[in-house]
Amino acid sequence: MRLVLDTCVLYPTVMREVLLGAAALGHYTPLWSARILEEWARAAIKLGPEGEAQARAEITMLRVAWPKAELRPSPGIEARLWLPDPADIHVLAVAVSGSADGIVTVNAKDFPKQILAEEGLDRLDPDGFLHGLWLEDPDGMQSVGQKVLDQARQMSDREWDMRSLLKKARLPRLAKALSQAG
C-alpha cells in the first residue's frame, strides 16, 4: 500500500515517528513531495529559528532513510483537480501521480472522501490507520510505540508514559491499545 503523508502528520514529531515506524515494518510505503516537506519546515518556524533548523535536519534524515518516497506531481495534473482548499491540491496531485492508495491526514474537511474516491484514493485518519495496523501486528506496533516513547523520554525532561504521549500526539485509540498491551 502506497500512502501520501500530509504535512499535518509529518509535523508533529511523535505522529511522524509512529507512522514511519509502521512503514519501516513494511506495513505501507510512505510518499511525500518536496512541497509537503517544505510546509513542515515552515510550520516549525513557530518554534523559533531553532525549530526550523531542526525540521530541516530531520527532513534531510528522512530523505536519506526514504530516498524513493519523494515524488513530484505530473506536469499539469493540478489544473484538473479540485479540493475545498486549493492550497491542498498539490497533496492530491502527488497521490494521483504516485499511484498512491490514499492520503494520511487529520485534515478531513479539506480532503472529502468522495472527491478522493473519484481518483481511486482513500483518506486515512492517522489514529484509525495506526490502530488498524496494531490490530494486524500488535507486537510490531508495540515495539514502534516503545521506541517512540523511549525517544521522547530521552529528548525531554518528562517521564512520559505511552498513553499520555500518544494522546498528546492525537493518537488516542493507538494510545489505549498500546498502553493496555504494554
Image: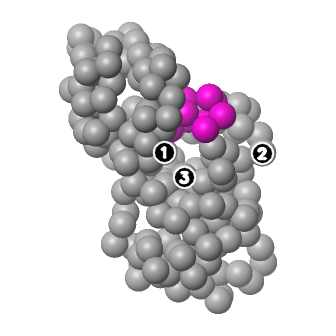
Callout 2, which amino acid? Lys
| Residue in view at x 73 percent, y 57 percent | 71
Please report the bounds of the magenta region as a residue range: 19-27
Q: Secondary structure at mark 1?
A: helix
Residue type beneath disc 3: Leu
- Residue 75: percent from the left, percent from the top? 78, 78
- Which residue matches tag 1? 10
User: Residue 35 got which mark?
Assistant: none
Where on the picture, by quarter, is residue 66? top right
The answer to whether 60 appears left or right of 9 in the picture is right
Q: Earlier in the sequence, mark 2 or mark 3?
A: 3
Give the CA separation, mark 1 to mark 3: 7 Å
Between the residue at mark 2 and the residue at mark 3, the CA separation in whole angstroms equals 14 Å
Q: Which residue is mark 2?
A: 68
Residue under pointer 3:
5
Residue 121 covered by magenta stretch = no
Which element is circle 3 on? Answer: strand
Residue situated in front as seen by the camera: 23 or 168: 23
Q: Of the two numbered discs 1 and 3 on the same chain, state the one appearing first in sequence.
A: 3
